[in-house]
Image (cartoon, rainbow, N blue to C red):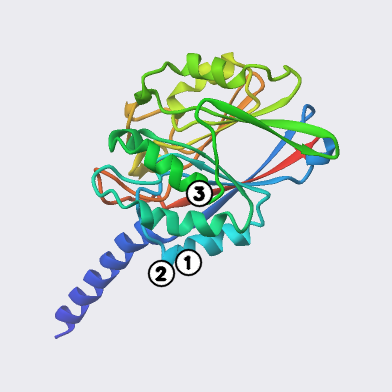
Amino acid sequence: MKRLSRTILYIVAFVLFFYANNNLLVTTEYTIESSKLPESFDGFRIVQVSDLHDAAFGDGQQRLVEKVKAADPDVVFLTGDLIDSRRYDLQNSLDAVKQFVKLADVYYVLGNHEVAVNQTDEIYMALENLGVHILPNQSLEIEHSGKRLAIIGIEDPLMGKEVQEMLEEAMAGIDEQTYKILLSHRPEKFETYVENKLDLVFTGHAHGGQIRLPFIGGLIAPGQGWLPTYTSGMYEADNTKMLVSRGLGNSLVPQRLFNLPELIVVELRSM
């Protein structure tokens, strides 16, 4: 009887462990300082939501929305793969987005899964109808007290253009001294972002490496293969900082290990 009870406890513990790895939302916070950032943007708060892949976090995405709300964002960045090409359910993701737009201005770039389902027009239209700012190789400047910063977005390379080409198109007309934030799905293009002197880059796509190993990091990531370089956290080179979100959902591999679903929260500081 004791052996049976112990076995049941082990089974319950394993089930809870695997459930938590896919469903326990965590928030990772960063403070980004820059002398290029206007003083009027000091304290500006950003929440990044990436790689939802049609996952559900509570009824009507309520757990996810409450996490975003608690971060008190000035803007929300959606960095691709809102949907999953294997179980396309746009409305499930829109349930979250329609609540995000009530909290802050929302900006969006697509990921490879939106391209894969061949529904980019439908997705763009649905998001625009909710009031989301779409950035298909475009930029917008936002202003506080007469000072500006640029939010730049590029599409996924599966749309048929090279990253450099898309960046040149999106950055046309932006003054070199303007603080530049890029939304891009793909972290493996970090060197290109550095070459283009972007100040801060938000990416996803790597799913944290899916399985994270102690002292090693992520195990595998699309576009990078085994033991990938860019899976989670902040990477710096020259004056460019890139944040890689571990994302929220899963795709081909249905289970995360030691890799909890993540929201990134950034507070900007002027030096």
Query: Image point 56% across, 27% down: which residue?
Result: 138
Look at the numbered discs 2 and 1 and tell me whether their residues touch, using CB distance below 8 Å. Answer: yes
Camera-side residue: 125 or 31?
125
- Count neighbours of disc 2 (C-alpha within 10 A) and say few if under 14, some if 14 to 19, many if 20 or more: few
The residue that mark 2 highlights is 59
Query: In the shown orientation, is residue 90 left or right of residue 139?
Result: left
- Count neighbours of disc 3 (C-alpha within 10 A) and say few if under 14, some if 14 to 19, many if 20 or more: few
Residue lying farthest to the bottom in this orientation = 1
Camera-side residue: 251 or 169?
169
Where residue 180 sits: x, y (%)?
A: 67, 27
Q: Amino acid at mark 1?
A: Gln
Q: Which mark is residue 62?
A: 1
Where residue 195 sits: x, y (%)?
A: 57, 13
Q: Is residue 21 visible?
A: no
Name which of mark 3 and mark 1 comes first in the sequence: 1
Camera-side residue: 119 or 242?
119
Q: Amino acid at mark 3?
A: Asn
Q: Amino acid at mark 2?
A: Asp
Camera-side residue: 40 or 124?
124
Where residue 243 sits: x, y (%)?
A: 55, 35
Q: Work out how far the residue at label 2 is from the one at label 1, CA to CA, in angstroms.
A: 6 Å
75 shown above or below 1: above
The residue that mark 3 highlights is 129
229 shown above or below 43: above
Q: Work out how far the residue at label 2 is from the one at label 3, CA to CA, in angstroms.
A: 22 Å
